[in-house]
Image: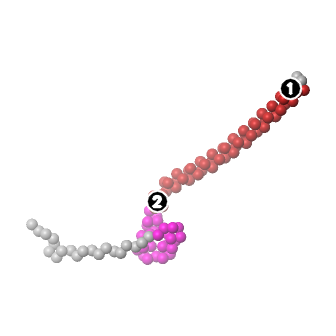
Amino acid sequence: MTRAQYWIVTSLAALCVAIMALNVTLSSLNRSRQAEVAQRQQYVQQSVQLESLYREIVRALAELAARNNDEDVRTLLQRHGISYTVNPAAATAPAPANGGPRK
């Protein structure tokens, strides 16, 4: 083996070792990113499952605040971007005196 061949083979071997080290590093980074994405995906899936429960809790809080005229609960909901309006109670029509139409 000539001196030039020795240096070419040695350079190629060093390049292969460097590429292998880069591959191991990138593989490790990829695994950590995949774990992070999996955690975020799990969080999103759990959030979707709990959305209806959260909506019912907010609705119950708003109804309770409206019924009891509770400004603290109303302020709490407004801080989280939730507002509501209170509809006036519908006036009920009086019942007919004769009990309705007869045949």
Q: Is residue 18 above or below residue 98?
A: above
Image coordinates of residue 8 in percent, x first then y, are 84, 29
The residue tagged with tag 1: helix, strand or loop? helix
Image quadrant where residue 87 sits: bottom left
For the record, the magenta segment spans: 56-83
Q: Amino acid at mark 1?
A: Gln
**Mark 2 vs mark 1, CA separation in Å:** 72 Å
Left or right side of 59 for 6: right
Judge by depth and name the residue closer to the eye, 51 or 83. 83
Q: Residue at the spot x=9%, y=66% of the render?
A: 103
In the rendering, at what x and y percent does residue 10 appear? Answer: 84, 31
Report which residue position mark 1 lands on: 5
Residue type at mark 2 is: Leu
**Residue 79 is a magenta residue:** yes
Mark toward the viewer: 2 or 1:
1
Q: Residues within 10 Å of mark 1 (few under 14, many from 20)?
A: few
The outermost residue toward the front is: 4
Was residue 97 drawn as part of the magenta stretch in this picture? Answer: no
Residue at horizontal 11 percent and vertical 68 percent from the top:
102
Residue bearing mark 2: 53
User: Residue 76: in sight, yes or no?
Assistant: yes
Where is residue 12 shown, x and y percent of the image? 81, 31
Asked where in the image residue 101 lies, by quadrant, the reply is bottom left
* Towards the viewer: 15 or 88: 15
Residue at image coords 51%, 73%: 75
Identity of the residue furthest to the left in this view: 103
Along the horizontal axis of the image, is 33 left or right of 4? left
